[in-house]
Image: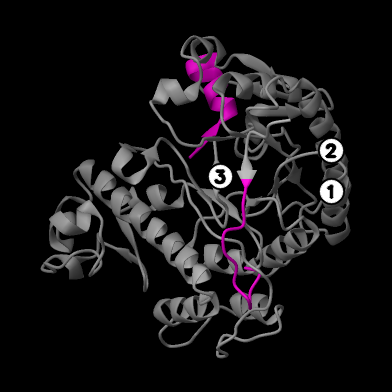
Amino acid sequence: MEKPLQFDVIASCSTTRARTRNTYHLGLRPGVELLKKAKGLHNFMGWKRALLTDSGGFQMVSLLHMAEINEQGVNFESPYDGTKSLLTPEKSIQIQNAIGADIIMQLDDVVPTTSKDNERMEEATYRTTRWLDRCLSAHERPNEQNIFPIVQGGLIEHLRKLSANLHLERKVNGYAIGGLSGGEAKEDFWKMVFLSTQMLPGDKPKYVMGVGFAVDLVICCALGADMFDCVFPTRTARFGCALTSSGQISLRHKKFRMDFGPIEKNCSCSTCKTYTRAYIHQIVTSEAVSCNLLSVHNLNYQMQLMKGIRESIKVNKFPEFVQQFMINMYPNKNYPQWCIDALQSLNKTLELKNLLRHKLKPIHFILESTMMYKQFWYPLLFMVMVLKNEIKV
C-alpha cells in the first residue's frame, strides 16, 4: 500500500542521537463544508507543501473553562458565538479528512502537566489510546494522510511508558509526544522527552508538541526529537521582541533609540536587510507593521537555526554545533542546569568536544506564522519544524 508520508534518513551524526493548523478552530471557521468545496486546505490557502493539523485536543486545556470531557468526546462552547458542539474522535478525523493535511493528529485527552491528580492522568492516558483506535477506524484517507498517535502520561514515568507501548502496537507512520510545555519544570520536561524518544522507533518521526524556544529545540534534537510546533516566534514579536543568536532582545527598550544597525548582523531576512533597530524601536508600540517585521525576522532566525542543525549533521559536526550554540547563547558559561543535566544524561558535558552519544537523523523544516509570506514559507497561525526528516508528499 502506498504511504502518504515517507521518512528517509539522509545523514546521521556519529556521536549523537540527535505548517500547522488547528482542527477545532478550522471546524468552526471556515467549517467543514467550505473546506470540502475548496477541495481541502492546501487549495483554500494556495499552499503546495506539507500541512499538519492538530486534533483540537489542546483546547481541553486552553479552553477548559468552556469544555466538558467524557468518554464520548469533548463538549465545547464556541468562543465565537457561544453555541455548543461535541468534538468526538470520529468528528475530529472527519474534519481533518476534509482539511486534507498530510499529517493529522489523533484526538487525545489532555490534562495540564501541572495537575497533581494522578488518577485523572491515568484515566486520560488510557482514554487517549481508546480514542486513538476510534480515530484509526474513522480515518477515510489512510493512503493520503498520516495519523500520529500522541504519547501522554504527564510527568509520571510509568504512564509515559504505558502510553508509548500501547501506541507502538498500532500501525502508524509517526508519533507525537504531547502533554508537555505546559508550565512544568524544565528538569521534568527534558526527562519526559528523553524517556519518550528512547521508546519510540528511530525510523519514524517523533513530534514534540508545543516547543519553540531555541535552546529547547537544540536540546530536544539532541535527545532524539524530530518535529516541533509553537506560536512563540510570532507571539513574542507582537510584544516587540526579536530572537538573536545571543538571546531575545526587546526593541521597546530605549537603548535601541539610536541603534542604526540591523536586528542581527549577517541576518538574511528582509527585515534586517531593510530596517534598523532604531526604526523598529520607533514604531514597535504604535504601528502594527512592527509585528510583521519582527515575525519575519524571528521566523527566519528559527529557520537558520534549523538549517544550522541540519548542515552540521550532514558533515558530522552536530556536537560542535551544540557547543557553539550554547557559547553564543550563554557567553558567561552560565548554562541552565537542566541543559547540563540533559546533555550529561547522554554521558557527556558541555565542555567536551563530543557532547552527545545518540544518533540524529537529518533535518528538514516547515514553518508557519500569522502572515502569508511565501518567500519564507509562512502560511497562517503556528510554526512547526519538521526536523531530521525528509517528508515527501
Q: Residue at x 74, y 21 (%)?
A: 90
Residue under pointer 2: 129
Element under label 1?
Answer: helix
Residue 293, image x and y in percent?
A: 24, 49
Separation of residues labelled 1 and 2 (CA atoms): 7 Å
Figure quadrant of the N terminus:
top right
Q: Nearer the viewer, mark 2 or mark 3?
A: 3
Which label belongs to residue 193?
A: none
Where residue 216 sits, quadrant-wise, is bottom right
- Amino acid type at circle 1 is Ser
Separation of residues labelled 3 and 1 (CA atoms): 26 Å
Q: Is residue 118 above or below residue 266?
A: above
* Residue 281 in sight in this render: no
Q: Is residue 24 magenta-colored?
A: yes
Separation of residues labelled 2 and 3 (CA atoms): 26 Å
Packing grade of label 1 (10 A; few <14, some 14-19, many >=20) is many
Residue, far front: 1
The earlier-in-sequence mark between 1 and 2 is: 2
Q: Is residue 140 magenta-colored?
A: no
| Numbered-mark total | 3
- Amino acid type at circle 2 is Thr
- Amino acid type at circle 3 is Ile
Where residue 158 sits, quadrant-wise, is bottom right
Residue 63, image x and y in percent?
A: 61, 34
The earlier-in-sequence mark between 3 and 1 is: 1
Residue under pointer 3: 391
Residue 264, image x and y in percent?
A: 25, 67
Packing grade of label 2 (10 A; few <14, some 14-19, many >=20) is many
Give the magenta range.
7-31
